[in-house]
Image: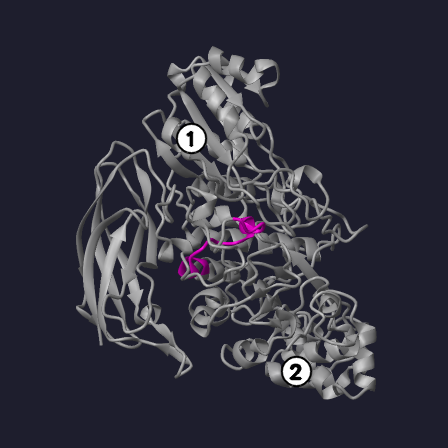
Amino acid sequence: MRFITVLLFFLAWSVPSGAQSHPFQDATLSDEERLNNLISLMTLEEKIDHLSSRLPGIPRLGLKGTRIVEGLHGLALSGPANWAVRGKGEAPTTTFPQAIGLAQMWDPVLHQELAAWEAYETRFLTQNENYKSAGLIVLAPNADLGRDIRWGRTEECYGEDAFLASVMTTAYVKGLQGDDPKYWKTASLMKHFLANSNENNREINSSDFDERLFHEYYAFAFYKGVTEGGSRAYMAAYNKYNGIPCTVHPMHREITVAKWGQDGIICTDGGAFTQLITAHHYYDSFAEAAAACIKSGITMFLDHYKPALYEALEQGLITEADIDRAVRGTLRVMLKLGFMDNHPGNPWSQIGITDTVRPWTRPEAKELARKATVKSIVLMKNDGILPLKSGEIRSIAVIGPSADLVVSDWYSGTPPYRVSVLSGIRNAVGKDVKIHFAAGNKADSAVQAAAMADVAVVCIGNHPLSHGLGWGENHVASDGREAIDRQALSLEQEDLVRLVKKANPNTVLVLVSSFPYAIPWSKEHIPAILHVTQSSQELGNGVADILFGKEIPAGRLVQTWSASIDHLPPILDYNIRNGRTYMYDENEPLFPFGHGLSYTTFEYNGLKTDRKTIREGKAAEVKLMIKNTGPIDSDEVVQLYVRFPESKVERPGKALKGFKRVHIPAGESLEVILPLKADDLKYWDTDKKTFVLEQGKVILMVGASSEDIRLTGSLNVK
């Protein structure tokens, strides 16, 4: 009798209401057993339906459906691109700084926390009865590398360094998917595999480079996202890689599936299937193209695919067994999300049901957005004017087109509120300080405002949506976004800075931008420069916190800011060894990779390692003492670079292999330990087709940026 009672209880939670019981709903069976059963019960039509980005589910079997959503820096529901499902309860969502700004935090722990909050909001909006407008497959993070600062989608990536991007990618994946061993909070679908870092002609161009750059650079963040982060989904890029469209490239099955264990979703980009015919001209018919997609490993289409797929089946180009293999990957992700059972052990299933307070209204959301904004801000230059002493200031001029503007980018949702720099400064100083505002210099308004103030804060930068122009259009040559690359690095608004500086020598430049600019005049003449990225709902409060010293800047750049556009190789040259990134660029940068200042000073001492030799599968601890020698408690970002002076293969002259953001009170010292794994010292051996640890000396370089090396040491590899 007790056995029957337990069995009835099991059936009550494992079977959706009104549905017949099937083995795939039994959470005690293995994943493969459950998938085998489900696929055996599905019709061919149902299988093909589940190769879509809108997974309908199968009511007759009790299988629930879901869909993909965007989420690079907060859930993109509604927003400029109107990502919400119409009529399903559109909602605001907590909006953090752009992805490139989140990388500038150099804080993977907070990065994971932000992704976890986004996943919570995604679950809430998927499961709450008042909304049910989201889906649990999140198209994030963007693991592409920002190897050229002209790339229009620079705002979406984590910078130019593969190691840093891999750490941030892994953290974001873990945050989205959660820490439960059985069920995912949401599914992380990384994009865009592979080497999609130019926009113009992306639907026809080929990103060409060798096997070593594939594994060591362009694919590395994806590799770590799968093998360490646990992602089981990614999107194929529009472009070709070495002459073969990424949509149908054999690398999917031969490398990511066979070598990395990627057994979930591999999807096309939007319209990429059609472009195999219309842009790449790679096949003679859509049926051939559809068959090639399935055979290469595609499991999900983001455009019109069904007629071509049925035609491919009729012509014998593929079989139902091929469809079974493809749909299995998508169904595996659905299983991990809990769509095949009602198991009470799923820790995410009651979000939005038992806890019905809208998450974007909670104080934790506001605090997280403000914290991320503050940590993402980079103090590029400071001649001592910052922090501003509000008690000594009677008037401030807040000037520029970005001063009273918070713009959502294409992959933002709609934030619940927006705080501009102007509003943030007003919040910080109160009513006792006079604010003079001028968006531009019409009728000399900016000059007059600057002249009347004790200090001028001028805010300039790009517009993430090119002021609403059509797809693929720039407002000015230095603008960029999806579908269009930047044609200039100079910032025409810098003329406004010149005028303001002439009227008031106490000028602070706040660059509100999605990417770097070549601003040598401002670097030479402006007393202080801050960089903050776009779109955060707390943008203005974060900037004000830094300006007035409520918070201490410690963000670091994740791209090299070139002094001139002619320092960059051709944008379609994907061989980074030809003078690209801090690893190979021999030009003096305007601001180097890893650069960022503080309001205090730090002294580095005592570099040592816990061992003199590192071997296969082991790790060394690189230790040093850092003392805060200034008067203010502050974070510092300690960076570890290496070089290989005895290498028999070509290696970069300097490569990031470790970092840590630490907090050190004024006058105190802290021992910082940077783990250095032997695996991170390997290179890809093209003969052995694997990563290999090369014997010899490794030079260790520790400092505050790639150009500000404070300590050096060495380690032997055996």
Q: Can residue 61 be seen at all in this image of the molecule? A: no
Q: Disc 1 marks which amino acid?
A: Ser
Left or right of 35? Residue 382 is: left
Q: Nearer the viewer, residue 2 or 335?
A: 335
Q: Disc 2 marks which amino acid?
A: Arg
- Which residue corresponds to mark 1? 522
Whether 156 is among the magenta residues is yes
- Which residue corresponds to mark 2? 34
Task: Tally the numbered discs.
Answer: 2
Q: Which mark is residue 347?
A: none
Where in the figure is residue 459, as x and y percent of width and height? 52, 29
Quarter of the N terminus within the rendering: bottom right
Q: Which residues are magenta?
A: 150-165
Nearer-N-terminus badge (2/1): 2
Name of the residue lying farthest toward the top: 452
Q: Are marks 2 and 1 in contact (CB under 8 Å)?
A: no
Where in the figure is residue 396, as x and y percent of width and height? 47, 17
Q: Nearer the viewer, residue 276 or 468?
A: 276
**Distance from Cα at disc 2 to Cα at disc 1:** 62 Å
Decide: is 52 above or below 467.
Answer: below
Q: Secondary structure at mark 2?
A: helix
Quarter of the C terminus within the rendering: bottom left
Q: Secondary structure at mark 1?
A: helix
Left or right of 444? Residue 381 is: left
Where in the figure is residue 320, as x and y percent of width and height? 75, 86
* Residue density around tag 1, few if under 14, some if 14–19, many if 20 or more, within 10 Å: some
Mark 2 or 1: in front is 1
